[in-house]
Amino acid sequence: MTNKLFDLNIELKGDLKAHDPALVKENDQWYLVHTGKGIGFKSSNNLSEWHSQDSILNEALSWWGDYVENFDRENDAWAPDLEYFNGKWWLYYSVSEFGTKNSLIGLLSAESIEAADWQDEGLVITSTQGQDFNSIDPNLFIDPEGKPWLVFGSWFDGIKLTELNKETMKPEGEIYSLAHRMVGKRPAGIEAPTLTYKDGYYYLFASIDHCCRGNKSDYKIACGRAESITGPYYDQDGTSLMDKGGSILAAADREFTGYGGQDLFENKYLVHHAYHRHSGEYRFFIKELDWEDGWPKIKNYDLKINSYYKLKNLENQKTAAVEAAKTEARARIICNNNQKAHTNHWLIYPIDAEYYRIQNRNSLLYLEVGDADKSDGADIQQWSNTRHICQEWELINLRDNIYKIINRNSGKALTKLEDDYLVQKEDQDLDSQKWKLDSL
């Protein structure tokens, strides 16, 4: 598999430290709001050079503690979103107790960003441990008929949507479910939703897997689309976003990993954060978007990573799967004929210019060599992301989507045994060591 990762098409400089960025423009000035104490705030007059400004709020609002007692006082306002509607700027933000559903979404308004005449509009929605959804990561969306909607949510019961009152800009009516990811009864990572509309479709972008782990973050930006704003949303493979679906827009590049916390500007720019793969420090990026055949694509990102694959062994035409569709760590990998099952489907995405991670769609765990063993015959299993190179694989293209899959840690080839279990062995150019990547 060739791997030409994109060259930055918008070179940024200045203060680029921002988590969960949201991009807007007022007159000739660009602004970025982001996670931070009092809501982080940056500006630029050319989209390239960025300068930090004073936070939107001088101090935490007194009423936050009535709903979220133990929020982080040093990093209190998360994942803000700023949009213009009905003659005002509306700034939604979240305050949360990390890892819980004790959360709130609040609202500020202003006539002008430059004038900074921010007014506290109070509480929008809140959640507690007793509820299914989590009230964080708000995104304001105005539909083609001029109706305002709020999409929000994180982990637990996934991504939610509710219509807003045009006057109060607060919820009225039903809360809809748009996307979630579950492994058995265990919720898996999906958050940071962004809605947009283009050419008859509503598009839902979300960040999946794990954020906030520095260079161990395996965040990815996923997308699905629907003909109705309330769904159902499907990815390019036709898998529902309510069933772990999501076409992968981007995950990593040569220097940075953990793409996520994304926002869109007029369907032209994608803004997101990522972590330096060595230092673990984060920054934000702005990428240009193309739209091809009704789906978004990052300009100059020439890698086809927006689908899942079946790994079909050339020797017996069976596909790699987790044994008995297990979802726990250490489950072994085997070949079988159950090609339609999610446990036989694998997401392959780059972690640098030469190597990939391979993630099971059913368990959301990663293909690895057990215990980072370098010896011949070591078992292949699944495990959560450890960032160890025993979970990284080189894909060597032989012909017609047929590959050798070589472990980065051992230099040995993914090999099917006679009993159909997978191990690593020295590359002997055997058919049992060759794999056809069938895109779903």
Image (tube, grey):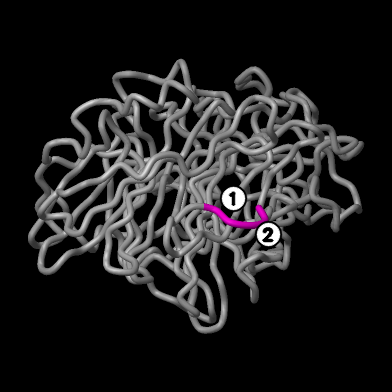
Q: Farthest residue toward the front?
A: 167
Marks 2 and 1, how far apart in space? 10 Å
User: Does residue 421 show up magenta in the picture?
Assistant: no
Q: Which one is in front, 322 or 236?
A: 236
In the rendered image, residue 299, in percent from the top left (x then y), is placed at 35, 69
Q: Do the residues labelled 2 and 1 touch (CB within 8 Å)?
A: yes
Residue that label 2 marks: 437
Range shown magenta? 171-175
Q: Is residue 143 above or below residue 183?
A: below
Identify the image quadrant of residue 59.
Answer: top left
Q: Residues within 10 Å of mark 2 (few under 14, many from 20)?
A: many
Residue occupying image coordinates x 34% and y 41%: 256
| Amino acid tagged 2 | Leu
In the rendered image, residue 21, in percent from the top left (x then y), is placed at 31, 47
| Amino acid tagged 1 | Ile
In the rendered image, residue 276, in percent from the top left (x then y), is placed at 31, 35
In the rendered image, residue 438, in percent from the top left (x then y), is placed at 71, 63
Badge 2 or badge 1: first in the primary sequence: 1
| Residue 234 in sight from this viewpoint | no
Residue that label 1 marks: 348
**In the image, is 233 to the left or to the right of 99?**
right
**In the image, is 309 to the left or to the right of 172?**
right
Q: Is residue 302 above or below residue 154?
A: below
Label drawn at residue 268:
none
Closer to the eye: label 2 or 1:
1
User: Does residue 172 show up magenta in the picture?
Assistant: yes
**In the image, is 154 to the left or to the right of 31?**
right
